[in-house]
Amino acid sequence: MSGNSGRWLCAAVAAVAAATTVAAGANAESAPEGKRLVVLGDSFTANALDLMPADQKCARGATAWPAQLSARMGIEGTDQVANPSCPGASIDSGPGYTLGFEAKDADQAGAFGPRTQLVTLQFGLNDHWGSNTRSLWDAMQQCVFDLADGCGTDAVGAGRMPDARAVSGAAYADRIRNVVTYIRYYAPNAHIVLVGYPEVVPADQDSVCLDFFGVVPFTQPRGRTVVDYFNHIDQAQREAAQLLNVDFLDARALTAGHGLCSPQPWVNGVFDPGTDIGGLPFHPSPTGDAVVADALYERYVR
């Protein structure tokens, strides 16, 4: 096997064998120069409703933060962007796209090289943690609308919510380490940034609220375990970034006070004209995505 596929396969085999380096794939083949921007992530990155079969390309929003960032960089629509982000993607839990698959797709497109300027990763909500067999995202969508039982502190023991205590910085770092090592080796000049999730619900809140049509708020008063899970994901990303010596963009801090049902929400409700009437519920509005795009541009590009 030749080209970028060959070097990725060599690195993947080395990782599985617990080798300490991914340089084994760097043979005499010509290495790509790299693309300026490489974006890896889930639906909070792609921010588009994916109605297509799994074997087709993933949907990506025209106002998602990668699109806004590439526009600010002056490279939108050019070959200087690699964005294989996909709704439903996870670090390694599947069944859809994973971080490894996305990184391999980007690598095969020549994304990683000495000219690569910025590589972003935004994952975690779709993964299984510890012995849990359900992701936060799957569980949340059910228990939030469970009027009888909700997502209170008893939800973990009752099996309605996964246990957030299984989400840790060390576990997060272990799960992304091989890909980060690979990127760092082949794109030595790039900023590698873990992008946090925006504020969906405040960190100290016990309830979860969602606007319908911009006028009918639905509130689940027993929502503490959902809030706890977002808190643990945020802390795990921060700690993992420190452990792996990469940067962390605190999107939650940047969007504080603008979560669901706030006076000025930057997260979509359901058919809410005040944010994005056709946008994914619980996901950033164009304004929320602009905040993330602007922060990445100011810190790592300008």
Image: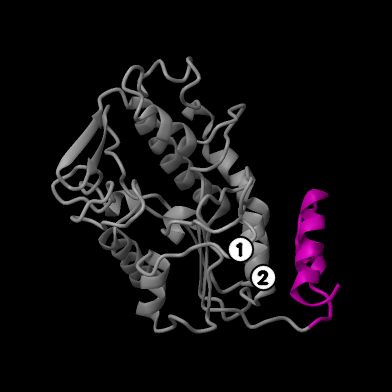
According to the picture, the residue beneath numbered tag 1 turns out to be: 56
Pointer 2 with pointer 1, Cβ within 8 A: no
Dot 2 or dot 1, earlier in sequence: 1
> Is residue 67 toward the left or the right of residue 105 in the image?
left
Splitting the image into 4 quarters, where does residue 152 fall?
Answer: top left
Mark drawn on residue 135:
none
Q: Position of residue 44 (x, y in %)?
A: 42, 54
> Is residue 22 toward the left or the right of residue 242 in the image?
right
In the image, 241 versus 290, the foreground residue is 290
Q: Secondary structure at mark 1?
A: loop
How many numbered marks appear?
2
Q: Position of residue 277 (x, y in %)?
A: 26, 56
Q: Quadrant of the C terminus?
A: bottom left
According to the picture, the residue beneath numbered tag 2 turns out to be: 107
Seen in the picture, residue 156 relative to 202 is either above or below; the reply is above
Residue type, numbered disc 1: Gln
**Residue extending furthest right?**
1
Q: Which residues are magenta?
A: 1-29
